[in-house]
Protein backbone atom coordinates (compact mmCIF):
# COMPACT_ATOMS: atom_id res chain seq x y z
CA UNK A 1 0.00 0.00 0.00
CA UNK A 2 2.80 2.43 0.83
CA UNK A 3 4.43 1.69 -2.52
CA UNK A 4 1.22 2.64 -4.30
CA UNK A 5 1.05 5.83 -2.26
CA UNK A 6 4.60 6.85 -3.05
CA UNK A 7 4.61 5.81 -6.70
CA UNK A 8 1.18 6.98 -7.78
CA UNK A 9 0.75 10.28 -5.99
CA UNK A 10 2.81 13.26 -7.07
CA UNK A 11 1.51 15.58 -4.34
CA UNK A 12 2.28 15.00 -0.65
CA UNK A 13 -0.94 16.64 0.59
CA UNK A 14 -3.28 14.48 2.65
CA UNK A 15 -6.39 15.71 0.85
CA UNK A 16 -4.90 14.60 -2.47
CA UNK A 17 -4.06 11.22 -0.97
CA UNK A 18 -7.62 10.78 0.30
CA UNK A 19 -9.05 11.76 -3.08
CA UNK A 20 -6.70 9.36 -4.90
CA UNK A 21 -7.72 6.54 -2.55
CA UNK A 22 -11.42 7.33 -2.98
CA UNK A 23 -12.11 7.87 0.71
CA UNK A 24 -12.77 11.62 0.51
CA UNK A 25 -16.38 12.55 -0.23
CA UNK A 26 -17.46 14.55 -3.27
CA UNK A 27 -19.62 17.57 -2.43
CA UNK A 28 -21.67 19.28 -5.09
CA UNK A 29 -23.35 22.43 -3.90
CA UNK A 30 -25.49 25.09 -5.49
CA UNK A 31 -27.17 28.03 -3.86
CA UNK A 32 -30.13 25.93 -2.66
CA UNK A 33 -28.95 22.34 -2.41
CA UNK A 34 -26.01 20.31 -1.22
CA UNK A 35 -25.29 16.73 -2.29
CA UNK A 36 -22.49 14.59 -0.82
CA UNK A 37 -21.56 11.30 -2.52
CA UNK A 38 -18.65 8.90 -2.77
CA UNK A 39 -15.94 9.10 -5.40
CA UNK A 40 -16.36 7.03 -8.52
CA UNK A 41 -12.99 7.81 -10.10
CA UNK A 42 -10.23 6.53 -7.84
CA UNK A 43 -7.45 4.00 -7.55
CA UNK A 44 -9.45 0.77 -7.33
CA UNK A 45 -6.52 -1.14 -5.80
CA UNK A 46 -6.03 1.40 -3.07
CA UNK A 47 -9.78 1.66 -2.42
CA UNK A 48 -10.07 -2.14 -2.07
CA UNK A 49 -7.06 -2.23 0.24
CA UNK A 50 -8.61 0.55 2.30
CA UNK A 51 -11.89 -1.33 2.69
CA UNK A 52 -10.01 -4.39 3.95
CA UNK A 53 -7.86 -2.24 6.25
CA UNK A 54 -10.88 -0.47 7.75
CA UNK A 55 -12.77 -3.76 8.20
CA UNK A 56 -9.77 -5.35 9.92
CA UNK A 57 -9.43 -2.29 12.15
CA UNK A 58 -13.05 -2.75 13.24
CA UNK A 59 -12.26 -6.12 14.78
CA UNK A 60 -8.80 -5.31 16.16
CA UNK A 61 -9.08 -1.72 17.36
CA UNK A 62 -11.57 -0.59 20.02
CA UNK A 63 -11.05 3.04 19.01
CA UNK A 64 -11.81 2.32 15.36
CA UNK A 65 -14.88 0.32 16.37
CA UNK A 66 -16.11 3.20 18.54
CA UNK A 67 -15.56 5.66 15.66
CA UNK A 68 -17.46 3.36 13.28
CA UNK A 69 -20.33 3.02 15.80
CA UNK A 70 -20.52 6.83 16.21
CA UNK A 71 -20.81 7.22 12.44
CA UNK A 72 -23.49 4.52 12.23
CA UNK A 73 -25.49 6.07 15.06
CA UNK A 74 -25.30 9.48 13.36
CA UNK A 75 -27.07 8.03 10.31
CA UNK A 76 -24.31 6.75 8.02
CA UNK A 77 -24.87 3.46 6.25
CA UNK A 78 -22.36 0.61 6.42
CA UNK A 79 -20.22 1.59 3.43
CA UNK A 80 -20.27 5.29 4.25
CA UNK A 81 -19.17 4.64 7.85
CA UNK A 82 -16.46 2.22 6.68
CA UNK A 83 -15.25 4.74 4.08
CA UNK A 84 -15.14 7.43 6.79
CA UNK A 85 -13.08 5.12 9.01
CA UNK A 86 -10.69 4.49 6.10
CA UNK A 87 -10.47 8.23 5.53
CA UNK A 88 -9.51 8.76 9.17
CA UNK A 89 -6.98 5.91 9.15
CA UNK A 90 -5.41 7.30 5.99
CA UNK A 91 -5.06 10.73 7.60
CA UNK A 92 -3.42 9.13 10.63
CA UNK A 93 -1.03 7.14 8.43
CA UNK A 94 -0.07 10.30 6.57
CA UNK A 95 0.52 12.13 9.86
CA UNK A 96 2.72 9.35 11.21
CA UNK A 97 4.79 9.17 8.02
CA UNK A 98 5.31 12.90 7.61
CA UNK A 99 6.15 13.52 11.29
CA UNK A 100 8.20 10.33 11.77
CA UNK A 101 6.04 9.19 14.69
CA UNK A 102 4.84 5.76 15.73
CA UNK A 103 1.13 5.02 15.63
CA UNK A 104 -0.58 5.33 19.00
CA UNK A 105 -4.24 4.38 19.17
CA UNK A 106 -4.83 6.40 22.33
CA UNK A 107 -3.88 9.56 20.42
CA UNK A 108 -5.45 8.53 17.12
CA UNK A 109 -8.90 7.70 18.48
CA UNK A 110 -9.17 9.90 21.54
CA UNK A 111 -12.74 10.29 22.70
CA UNK A 112 -14.12 13.82 22.41
CA UNK A 113 -14.80 15.34 25.78
CA UNK A 114 -18.49 15.51 26.66
CA UNK A 115 -19.74 19.01 27.16
CA UNK A 116 -21.84 19.67 30.30
CA UNK A 117 -24.93 20.21 28.12
CA UNK A 118 -24.71 16.79 26.45
CA UNK A 119 -23.84 15.05 29.73
CA UNK A 120 -26.90 16.54 31.43
CA UNK A 121 -29.27 15.43 28.68
Image (cartoon, helix red, strand yellow):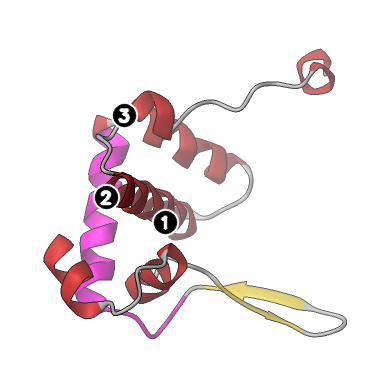
Q: Residue at x 35, y 68 (%)?
A: 12
Q: Nearer the viewer, mark 3 or mark 2?
A: 2
- Magenta span dominant secondary structure: helix
Q: Which residue is mark 3?
A: 104
10 Å neighbourhood of mark 3: few (<14), some, or many (≥20)? few
* Image quarter of residue 62: top left
The quarter holding residue 94 reads: bottom left
| Residue that carries the numbered disc 2 in the rendered image | 97
Asked if one can make out residue 1 in the rendered structure from this viewpoint, the answer is no
Q: Residues within 10 Å of mark 1 (few under 14, many from 20)?
A: many
Q: Residue at x 28, y 35 (%)?
A: 103
Number of numbered discs present? 3
Q: Which mark is residue 87?
A: 1
Residue extending farthest front:
99
- In this rendering, is residue 21 above or below 75? below
Magenta span contains residue 44? yes
Whether the residues at callouts 3 and 1 have beta carbons within 8 Å, the answer is no
Q: Which residue is at 80% across, 79% downward?
A: 33
Locate residue 20, reporting x and y percent.
35, 75
Name the N-terminal-most of marks 2 and 1: 1
Amino acid sequence: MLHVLRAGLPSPLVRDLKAYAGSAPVTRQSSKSRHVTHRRIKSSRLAATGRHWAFAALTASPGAHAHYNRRRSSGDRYHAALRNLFNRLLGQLHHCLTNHQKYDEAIAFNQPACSPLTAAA
